[in-house]
Image (spheres, rainbow, N blue to C red):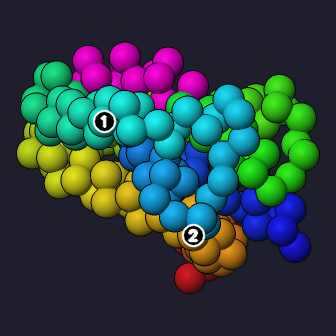
Amino acid sequence: MDALLGILSAFGLSASAGLNAYIPLLIVGVIAHYTDLIKLNPPFDLLANPWVLIVLGLLVIVEMVADKVPAVNHINDVIQTVIRPAAGAIIFAASANVITDVNPVLALILGLLVAGGVHTVKAVAVRPAVTATTGGAGNVPVSIAEDVIATILSILAAVIPILVAAFVILLLSLVIWWMWKRARRSQGRV
């Protein structure tokens, strides 16, 4: 059961990194530094270093501000195309190895793919659609929602990873239901 919870935590944290690279790193670092809930193995224990936490806090602020400024948010997304998958890889490897003996290379690859996938959907599909349909006015509220989701998901993934599994099952169920309903509607049967 501990191994499953560790993997669920790793997936949730790396998905969160796809929305905001630094929030899950900061949350895991703070939890590891101030509580006994998470004990990071070397070299990932550096995330709990006070100087690293200060830098991560500053990076969270920079990313949040940059993501709210028109035109800068698009440049930020281009820069984050490299940073978010890397952060996802680091956080996946750090959190998966807390409880399990997952091969670090496999953990890094999985984290890279999860965070990269979330970031790609956000940067290629969601944000351009929001910009096109709202003339850019919807970007700030969507960015705030992404930061809130990244924070909540990171906290839940670190503290109560079983909720991440329930959330993923619920989300997949809704997506499947929506696709089924859409397919039936396109066939003319509603």
Picture residue at 60% right of the left edge, 74% below the top: 160
Residue 54's disc number: 1
Q: Taking 6 as reference, is 60 above or below it?
A: above
Q: Residue at x 28, y 23 (%)?
A: 76
Q: Position of residue 57 (x, y in %)?
A: 29, 39
Disc 2: CA contacts within 10 A as few (<14), some (14-19) or many (>=20)? some
Q: Position of residue 167 (x, y in %)?
A: 59, 73
Of tags 2 and 1, the one toward the viewer is 1
Q: Say whether disc 2 or disc 1 marks the residue closer to the N-terminus.
A: 1
Determine if the magenta segment contains residue 78. yes
**Magenta-drawn stretch, dominant element (helix, strand or loop):** helix
Q: Report which quarter residue 150 is drawn in.
A: bottom left
Residue 72 figure quarter? top left
The residues colored magenta run: 74-86
**Residue type indicated by callout 1:** Ile
Q: Residue 189: within the magenta?
A: no
Say left or right for 101 vs 71.
Answer: right
Q: Circle 2 sits on which residue?
A: 159
